[in-house]
Image (cartoon, rainbow, N blue to C red):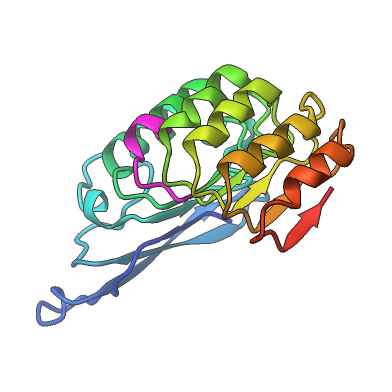
Amino acid sequence: SMRTAVSADHSSTASTAASRSECHETAPNRNGRQDSIECEERRACSNTPTLDNRNNTTCINVTVSLDLSWCGPYGALSSSTFLEFIHKCGQRLRVLRLSCCDFVDNYCLYMIANVCHDLEELDVSRCYQLDFLGLGELNNLSSLTRLNLSYTKLKTGTLQVLLQHTRHLQHLGMSGCQSVDMDEVCVALGLFCPGLVSLTAWKTEGLSHRGLRALATIRTLQDLDV
């Protein structure tokens, strides 16, 4: 399903238009059903912010969470439409979930990294167009606390540099990244991410006693799935 969440509620009367607002719209998903798109806005919304509403500017001040996971198969959603939305409405995004989105490519990550400076959660798992060049752009997202890169073309060196710039990271997913040396990643996590709470890295390679010893130095670590 596709969900946009921002804080507020919506009223059709002028007396409550200035208060919190909530509006609902529907859009077809990959199975042809009508999924709910929820918009909660901090201020009154005269138009429901959707990816295709090019004249709407209210989303610039209100959209803080966007979940497009599994959206856009078979060209239903293009990267150009997504990028236009990010350009107009991405400044205050804190949560962005794009798992299994066929339209997400390296340039999308470039734009996300240069527009969404307050982003705290990013999920680009199973976005198969991404490679180390696009993933390297994420170095600009220093506020990230939750990051899922599972089943992408992630490289060891790319992740090592990324971890140096995301020192507030608490949750990291990198399952299925078979080109990554887990020992090197664990050493980098021990050095740069002292607040790590969970690491999900099954179907990866290269973990030995060296990597486990590095993880043992992270006192906040609670959930380890390798």
- Most extreme residue toward the top is 133
Nearest the eye: 189 or 80: 189
Residue 177 % position (x, y):
77, 32
Residue 164 % position (x, y):
52, 33
Quarter of the view holding residue 19: bottom left
Can you see residue 67? yes
Nearest the eye: 175 or 77: 175
| Identity of the residue drawn at 74% across and 35% down | 151
Nearest the eye: 160 or 213: 213
| Identity of the residue drawn at 43% across and 25% down | 110
Residue 38 % position (x, y):
42, 64
Quarter of the view holding residue 195: bottom right
- Looking at the figure, which quarter contains the N terminus? bottom right
Is residue 33 in the magenta section? no
Nearest the eye: 184 or 3: 184
Can you see residue 155? no
Residue 83 % position (x, y):
39, 31
- Most extreme residue toward the bottom is 15
- What residue span does the magenta drawing correspond to? 112-120
| Identity of the residue drawn at 89% across and 41% down | 209
Q: Is residue 223 above or below residue 97?
A: below
Is residue 117 in the magenta section? yes
Q: Is residue 138 above or below residue 53?
A: above
Q: Is residue 137 left or right of residue 31?
A: left
